[in-house]
Amino acid sequence: MDKWKKLRKDLFRAVEPEIKLVAISQPVGEYKDLCTPETLPAFTARASHESKGTKEDDIRLNKTLIELGHDTPLQSVQFVLYFSGVTKSLQAQWTRHKIGVGWTFRSTRYVPASQNYFVYNTYDYIDEEEKVKELLKIDEEIAKKAIELFDRKIALGSTKQDGRKIMPVFWSTSCYFYVNARALRHLFKLRLDKAAEWEIRRMASILYDICMEWTPSLFENLKELRGKSGF
């Protein structure tokens, strides 16, 4: 469980992943007293039977909807989150998710790649500290060289978008992520699984914990999967 994190702390431009919740769907007007961000799915689902219930009833109904696979009402809860410390390698996997999601990424067509930071490997599968230090030293050398060569290319007249192509896939990017609760459940089922690549599994673990703080009834039946994620 990230046993070598201490070794990454002082590496060249090292960053760790961070996720912040920016916004979440909020009832407005007369609905402020009728539902909360968490109870929106059940509250809106009641339209099919013209039924009514308390907020506590709606929490229970959320769980029933999930158990029965009635996922459409979960689309009523939209999250906006800010991510930093994720690699371009992770971005390539993450953007394979297509439904109910969207991104605005930091663009190195416009932001100089010389400002890049790096997300170093965990190497959790290696037990010898000296070997991990050597591996991280190699990664650090690559990061330093990439920045040096980018600056040289720019000095020779290269555009930023052509200069950035020498950057290793572990350079860090940031983005705003737009996603609804239904799409999040799908992401968690795939990316909390031990078969998922470690970096996206780590990201999904952090994201899951944030979602559980705000809308636990929508995600709590995935808690066992989260517990097995390794992060």
Image (cartoon, rainbow, N blue to C red):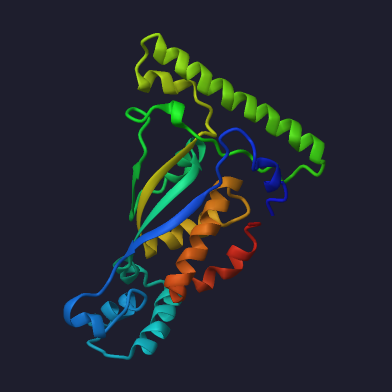
Residue sitting nearer the eye, 41 or 142: 142
Q: Is residue 29 left or right of residue 114?
A: left
Q: Is residue 107 left or right of residue 33?
A: right
Q: Residue at x 34, y 79 (%)?
A: 39
Residue sitting nearer the eye, 39 or 22: 22
Where 206 sits versus 128, above or below? Answer: below
Residue 4 horizontal/vertical position (percent) = 72, 46
Number of numbered labels in the structure image:
0
Where 206 sits versus 52, above or below? Answer: above
Residue 223 horizontal/vertical position (percent) = 57, 69
Residue 27 horizontal/vertical position (percent) = 25, 75
Residue 73 horizontal/vertical position (percent) = 31, 71
Quarter of the view holding residue 179: bottom left
Quarter of the view holding residue 28: bottom left
Image quarter where the C terminus lies is bottom right
Residue sitting nearer the eye, 116 or 189: 116
Q: Residue at x 66, y 41 (%)?
A: 8
